[in-house]
Amino acid sequence: ETVMTQSPVTLSVSPGERATLSCRASQSVITNLAWYQQKPGQAPRLLIYGASTRATGVPARFSGSGSGTEFTLTISSLQSEDFAVYYCQQYNNWLSWTFGQGTKVEIK
Amino acid sequence: QVQLVQSEAEVKKPGASVKVSCKASGYTLTESSIHWVRQAPGKGLEWMGGLDPEDGETIYAQKFAGRMTMTDDTSRDTAYMELSGLRSDDTAVYYCATNFQSNLLWGQGTQVTVPS
C-alpha cells in the first residue's frame, strides 16, 4: 500500500499571501497524483490531476508540481474562497488508491 | 456527458447491510476501474476498494476486507458496493469514482446513516 503523507496538518495564511502544501508518497506514483479542495458540507472538488494539470474551471492561482514521491500544491495569492481542506490522492495503481490525511488552510 | 450517478440516501439499523449503486453514464462501465471512497463526519477521505468491471478483479482496503463486497452488472453499466455488519461508525457519505481516460470522476455521494 502506498501511504500518502501531507504537511502541514494546518496552514495559517493571510488573504493575498502564497500557500504551499506538500504531499509525500511512500513509493513512486510517477505523476498519478491529484489534489482536491473540500469545503464544509460539500463534496471534494478536483483541482489538479496528473500532478500538474488544472481541472476544468480551476483558477490559474492553483498550481501543482512534482513527480515520483514529492508533490506540491501552490496557491499563489489566497482568496477568501480558498480557505478549505485540501487532500492529495495517488491513483498510480489501477485498483488501489490512497489519500493523504488533508491540510486545512485557515485564515491567519 | 460522462458521469457517475449514485443511489439515494439510506438509513440502516446496526448489524444490517447496505448496498449502494453507481451507474456509469456517457461511457461503458468496463472501460475503467471503479473505486469506492467514504467520508465520515468530520473525517478525511478513506479509500475502501477498487473493482475492474472487465474481469471482476477486486482489491479491498484491509479495514474493509470481509465486510465489503464490490460487484457490477455490466449490462446495466452499474457497479455496487455492499457493506455488512453496519455500525454507527459506518455513518458516512459513500462515493464511487473512476479514472476514465485520465479524467477523475466522482459520483454525487450517498449518505448512509446508522443510528446508534
Image (cartoon, helix red, strand yellow):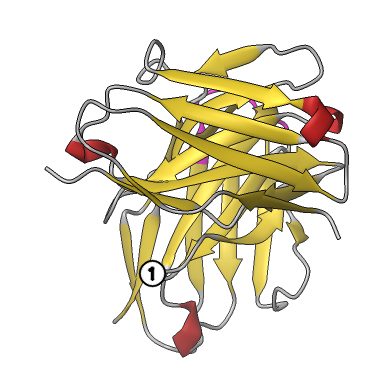
Q: Does A61 appear above or below B103?
A: below
Residue A97 image point, x, y percent: 58, 30
Q: Does A54 appear above or below A66?
A: below
Residue hosting label 1: A41
Residue that appears at 75% across and 40% down: B99
Residue that appears at 37% across and 70% down: A40
Question: Is residue B30 within the magenta segment?
Answer: no
Residue A95 seen in the current view? no
Q: Quadrant of residue A63?
A: bottom right
Quadrant assignment for the C terminus of chain A: bottom left
Chain to which the residue tagged by mark 1 belongs:
A
Q: Which region of the structure is painted magenta?
A: A24-30
Q: Around disc 1, counting alpha carbons within 10 Å, would you say few (fewer than 14), some (14 to 19), or many (20 or more)?
A: few
Identify the secondary structure beneath mark 1: loop
Residue that appears at 62% across and 14% down: B58
Q: Does B110 appear above or below B73?
A: below
